[in-house]
Image (spheres, rainbow, N blue to C red):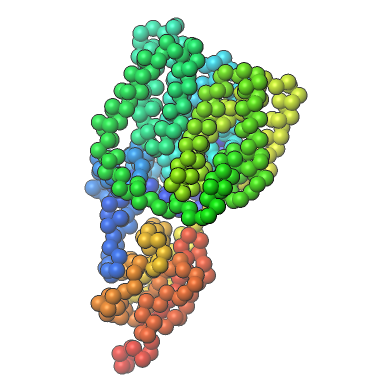
Amino acid sequence: MLIIALGLRTYGLGDQDYWLDELHSLTDSAGRRSDFEAVPHGVILKTVPRFTDLTPETTWPTVWREMKVDSHPPTYFLLLLGWRWIFGDGEFAVRVLPTLFSVLSIIPVALMLRAYGLVRPGVWAATLCAVTYCHIHIGQENRPYSLGLLFICISYWSLIKLITGWADMGRGGRWLWSLLYGAAVYLAVLTHYFTALAIIPQAVFLATPEARRFLRTWTLIIAGAACVFVLTWGGQFLAQLDFIMHQDWVQENRPDHDLRTVLRVTDLPIRLLFTHVRFEMNYIFSVAGAAIVAGSLISIWFHRARRAIVFAAWYLFPVLTFAVIDTVTDKQLLSHVRYTSVAVPGLIGMLVLAVRPLNRRLRTGLIVLFALAVVLTLQLPTQTNPENARAAELIAEQLEPGDLLVFDAMDWPPFWTARIYHNVSYYLPVYLDGPNPPVLLLRDPPSEALKQDITAYERIVVVAPRPDDIPNPIPNRYELVNSTGYIDKVGFIYLFARRATERPKGT
C-alpha cells in the first residue's frame, strides 16, 4: 500500500506550476517573508529581487525569526530549507518532501490498529489512506499539512502503545514511548496550529477503563509539551497574532452563510474521501456525507465498538470546531480540505471499525462500493494549474528593454497586487533575455507625482485581475496596443504605448 500511495502521489507531481501558498512556502523557507511583505506600493522599483530565492544570509535561525510575519509555525519551513539546499527548487524536487510525509503518515495509522490487535483493519485503513483524495492532495502540495498529519498519527500510535502496554513496559520503555508521544504532540502543533484540534480528542482515551491509570502520566506529558512550546515558540506566536487576525480572505459575506456551513459539515466526508470539488451547494453530496457519518456512528453504538469511539472523536471534534468558528466569525474554513485534513485518519478509522462487525456479505458489498466510488472519482494530479509560467512567458513576450511592468489590482483586496506579482515573479526570469524590468505595484490610483514618473516610459506592460475595465494608468497619455485573454490566478496582460501626441518630436 505504501508503494501504491507513493505512485499516486508522485504521478504528475512536477507538471503544474507552484500556486501562491507554495510560493509563500519557498519565501518562508528562504527567510525572506518580511522583505516580501514590505515591498512598497505606488513606487517604481528599479530592481526587485525574487523573494523565493535562497541567499547566503539564509539560515535556520533566520527562517525561525522571519515566521513572525506568517500565520504558521516553523517546523515544515525549517525542513524545507535543508531539503532545498540538497535537492534544489524544482516543482517535483520540492514536492517530494511533503509526498514522503504523506506516505509515512500511513504507517502509524496501521500500527495504532495493530496495537489494539486489529491487524486486518489496520491494512484496510492503510489502503484507504493511500487512495483517498484529501490524503493524496496534501501529499502533492508544498505546504505543511502532510507533516502535521504525520506527527498527529505518530502521537495517536504512541499513545495507544502507552495505554495498551503500560503494565508490561519497563522503566526505559515507558520513558521512551512517553518522550515519543510528547515530542509528536509538540512537533505537530509546531507544524500547524490546527493539529491541536486533532490532539485534544485524545482525552477520550482517558475515559476508557484501561487508560484511567494513565491519566496522571498523560497530564504531565501534555503539560511538558505545552511548556516547551511556550518557551520555544510562545513569543513568536504572540508576534504572529496581528498577522493572523487580518487573514480576511476566508471571510464569507453571504446571507445564506449558516446554511452553507451546515452543508459543508455534512458533505465533508465526500470531499475528503472522493472529490476534488472545493465546495458547492450540492445536496446529494450532503445527504451522502451525512449518511456515511450517521451510519458509522449507528454501527459503532449498536455493536459497542469501543475502539472506534476514539476515531469518531478524532474526526468529529475538529470538524465541529471548524463549524462553530465558521458560524460565529462568518469564515469558511470548512471549504478547504487541507485544513480539515487533520481529521482524515479519524474518519477512515471510524469507517473501518464501523464496517468490521457487519456480516461478511454486507461488509464486502460496502468495501466494493467504496472502491468503485474511489476509482470513478480519483483524478490525478489533484492540484489545479495556476498558469503562472504561461503568464510569465506572455509578459516576457511583450516586454522590451526600457519598459515598465505594472501590477494593478485597484479596487480589489489589498493583498491581490502582491499576490499576482508573487505568482509571476518566480517564473519571469526563465523567459527574460535581460535583467528584470522596473516594477510598479498599484492598489490605489496613481498620484500626480507618480504619473510623472510613469510617463518617463514609452511603453507599459500592465498585469491586472480586473475583467470589467481596461487598467490604463494614464488614459490621456497612453493607448492600448495589445492584450491577452484571462490567465488563471493572474489576470489579463495589457500593453500600453505612449500616444503619438505625447511623444517627443522626431520619435
Relative height, residue 212 to residue 322 (above, below): above
Q: From this viewpoint, which residue is outermost toward the right?
A: 361
**Residue 125 makes an appearance in the image:** no
Relative height, residue 171 to residue 115 (above, below): above
Location of residue 214 in the rendering, given as x and y in whole percent from the top left corner: 41, 13
**Residue 94 makes an appearance in the image:** yes
Q: Residue at x 28, y 63 (%)?
A: 40
Q: Residue at x 50, y 70 (%)?
A: 467
Location of residue 194 in the rendering, given as x and y in whole percent from the top left corner: 42, 37
Q: Residue at x 35, y 29 (%)?
A: 186
Q: Residue 179 appears in which quarter of the rendering?
A: top left
Location of residue 195 in the rendering, given as x and y in whole percent from the top left corner: 42, 34
* The N terminus - image quarter: top right
Relative height, residue 420 to residue 483 (above, below): above
* The C terminus - image quarter: bottom left
Report the number of numbered marks: 0
Location of residue 100 in the rendering, given as x and y in whole percent from the top left corner: 47, 35
Q: Residue at x 51, y 55 (%)?
A: 254
Side of 276 where 404 appears, left or right: left
Decide which of 95, 412 is in the foreground and name it: 412
Q: Residue 199 appears in which quarter of the rendering?
A: top left
Q: From this viewpoint, which residue is outermost toward the bottom?
A: 505
